[in-house]
Amino acid sequence: MDLKDIQNLIKFVAKSGASEVKLETDDVKITIKTGGDDKETQTIVQQIPMGAMAPAPVAAAPQPVAAAVPAQPVAEEDNSKYITIKSPIIGTLYRKPSPDKPVFVEVGQTIKEGDVLCIIEAMKLFNEIESEVSGKIVKVLVDDASPVEFDQPLFLVDPS
């Protein structure tokens, strides 16, 4: 199952009104949970090692969820003076240009417009994410080699 199939499945589940869908194939296990009225969707994709389990039938039955998992509230009073740099694409974030090199930016480092903050790999393409603001890195919100979603907060920058 490729990325396009997964994206189409997410769109289909969001439109269907189902609160949760689980899909399991020979090599992929996907769980899609929607938040209902607030249009929040959570997707979990797991690769299953070959030979770890026998081929399982596809199960995609919506089941009601007793309590929706709330998103982590961001402390607005603390972060309101900071600029949030968000992911422009879906992919895997890397904080270093290669495993043996230092990270692009550290907390406390001063950056300027155009500085490379990280790399996001999407479909075997490595995209440099450059800063659109100048300031000081206050917080790194994503770990190295972590999957990121479109518009996910990556860094907090103090513009002063």
Image (cartoon, grey):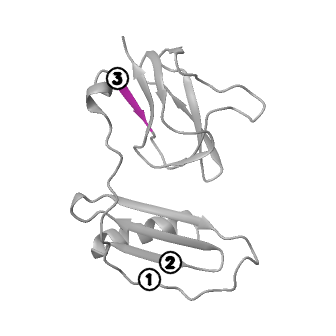
Extent of the magenta region? 82-86
Give above or below for 54 relative to 9: below
* 142 over 16 or under it: above or below: above
> Please, is residue 111 above or below residue 46 in the view?
above
Q: Residue at x 37, y 15 (%)?
A: 159
Dividing the picture into quarters, in which one does residue 41 lie?
bottom left
| Percent of width and height locating residue 101 | 74, 27
Other residues around mark 2 within 10 Å, as few (<14) / some (14–19) / many (≥20): some
Q: Earlier in the sequence, mark 2 or mark 1?
A: 2
Say which residue appears at 59% left-offset and 65% top-offset: 46
**Measured Cα–Cα span from mark 3 to mark 2:** 39 Å
Residue ID at (65%, 27%): 103
Please, what is the three-letter code of the amino acid marked with disc 3?
Answer: Tyr
Q: Earlier in the sequence, mark 3 or mark 2?
A: 2
Q: Which residue is mark 2?
A: 23
At label 2, which amino acid type do we have? Leu
Q: From the image, tell me which residue sits under label 1.
A: 60
